[in-house]
Image (cartoon, rainbow, N blue to C red):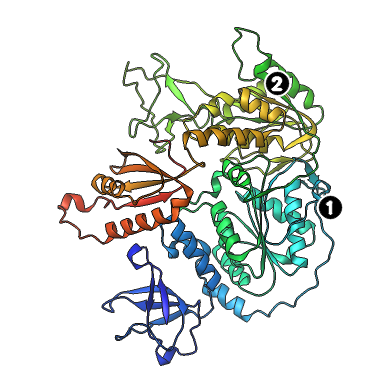
Amino acid sequence: MSVLLDTPLPQLDHVFEYRIPESLSGQIEVGSKVSVPLRGGTRFSDAYVTAITDKPEFSGDLLSVEKVISGISLLQPQTLELARKVADRQAGSAIDVLRLAIPARYVRAEKSFLSSEIPVKVEISSQAVKPAEFSDFTVQEGQKYALKVPPRLAETQAGKTIPNWSQLFVGMAHEQLIKGKSTIIAVPDFRDIELLELALNDAGLSQYFIRVDAKLSGQERYLNYLRSLGDQPLIVIGNRSAVLAPAPHLGLVMLWDDGDHNFEEPLAPYAHARDVALIRQSQTNCSLLFASYTRSLEIQRLVELNYLSEVDVRTTQHPQIVLTDAHLEEGETPSRIPAAAWLGAKKALENGPVLVQVASPGFAPALICSSCRERATCQSCHGPLQLAHKTATPSCRWCGQLNASWKCSGCGNSRLRPVAAGTERTSDEIGRAFPGVKVIVADGNHILTSVPAEPSIIVATPGAEPIAHGGYSAILLLDGERLRGREAFRVDEDVLRNWSNTIALAHSSATVFINGAGISLGAALVNSEQILWAAHELSERQQFRLPPAVRVVSVTGPAETVRNTCDELPNLSTHRVLGPVGMPDGSTRALIFFEYKDGEELAKYLRAAVITSATRSKRPVSPAERGGRVLRLRVRFDDPDIDAL
């Protein structure tokens, strides 16, 4: 039989042959998890069975399987094929992809699954639940779509407020169930999963969906994975790894807000969920939908190539957008919370809650010396200092170390001054300006998913905004200049996406005040022209040959290895290399920009370079060096962190 070893060593990323002993005959099938001996027989590795045959290709003596870990077919052939395609595109190992797809095994959950009765196939109601604005949209088999969702808040039968996109996704998944097909829905974070769960339960589909996200316990996640291996059509909901989940008779894959950075996989081989979805669609010929309130540049590129079809839907009533910068007189200094926004919030409180979005959590995310105005940095790692709350000890935003005895390295002063306001400080200021009004903080330290329809002010960071029952009566988007002033390659795209998502939480008759939007982003939001903005931005990227008009791969490792790897690149149609430059951890990194059509050839070359680096003979090291990290070549395609060069 053939197996794929569960090992991080890139040189072992291929199938090996083993013999099934008579004692284990009948206990192993394709997809089973087993333990096999490595060369020499003194060490063992877990492995997945990929094929069983009576005639091995290896002519010598085969080692025997040591034991069966799980006799269930955990690895399906189509999952292995998907993992291999993803790994080949990213110059990675298939087993690394499978670790993301197959959760850790729990014996108790497996025994419970095996002892449970096979569910009886239940007739599914033919009633669809799509919102009215999407009634003319019907998914055709094998087609790929891009949809800009007109923002509107809907209400469940139980009186809960949910966004219309969640009802759309549930309605489309419902239609697939009626056809006897499964649906995979991938969303950025747990808040979106809970919205989908609410919409699915409201539609009476509670027994037809499973979650595969990390908020579940290990046993629950493994049990749901086992359930997805069956033959019954299901709705699979989860985060980025959900796109890898098995789904019987897959008919549709949907991604919500693919531009969210939570879809970027931080583990090797670093495949974005959007790319995995595209690979899976080509593998299974299922339908594919990318939906959001705005448009990522990657999706805009695919639309312009006619690879994705744009969906035309009915427009809905939008909140009024007020750009506070446009009301400034010549020479007037802009205020963090302009007078128009104060007055608008005061009036809106008569009708319901008001949302105030700020850039950072805590009290003061940045501090300076009160004497010389130099930026205050950590005495240990030189990272920026912050105040978590008003009476907190200054702490480092990088390493978290407290700096109670901080002194300015320039003038020796020990007094600090805040230069930016986070959620805590903003809530204090608003509380003094609106006495008697409840002020609520929602950020990473204060998780809140919903608020009632009563007068209150919610101060939140981007992405942490709770949903207000019936929608917010007004929204204040502050700190636009701080958000857009970050040194990041995609900063404007991120700000436009975050603001579009936040505006969608407002009531249709509400007013949204935006401070520091600038001309381009401001016009896109006022006129709801996010697609036109994306098209213009993509056009500029094409002129300068920047992602996503072209692809990029980062090559990191020892200086000599990186330099040799870049010097010996294959003959590509066109490419350019930036670097290599030194990194803070002692390694060296180079960026290679290349055409999409050269991706397969470049991935093969870089994969070979990674294996060569991993298998080269190790030089003797001194005792002082043994405790240090051994640098090896690391390759990351479509690296989102290209701002360091």
Report the side of 499 relative to 604 (left or right): right
What label does residue 341 carry, if any? 2
Which residue: 57% across, 33% down?
Answer: 537
User: Where residue 607 appears, x then y in whole percent?
Assistant: 36, 58
Q: Position of residue 498 (x, y in %)?
A: 62, 36
Q: Residues within 10 Å of mark 2 (few under 14, many from 20)?
A: many
Instruction: Tell me where residue 214 sits by quadrant.
Output: bottom right
Is any atom of residue 163 visible in this view? Answer: no
Type of residue at label 1? Gln
**Residue 534: image location, x then y, percent:** 61, 36
For residue 506, side relative to residue 626 (left or right): right
In the depicted structure, whether residue 204 falls above or below residue 351: below
* Quadrant holding the C terminus: top left
Q: CA–CA distance between discs 2 and 1?
A: 35 Å
Mark 2 falls on what kind of element?
helix
What residue is pinned by disc 1? Answer: 157
Closer-to-camera residue (123/11): 11
Residue 454: x %, y % from top left: 78, 35
Quadrant (top left, top right, bottom left, bottom right) of the N terminus:
bottom left
Residue found at x 56% / y 37%: 538
Name which of mark 2 and mark 1 comes first in the sequence: 1
Q: Residue at x 23, y 60 (%)?
A: 616
Q: Is residue 74 visible?
A: yes
Looking at the rendered structure, the kind of residue marked 2 is: Ala
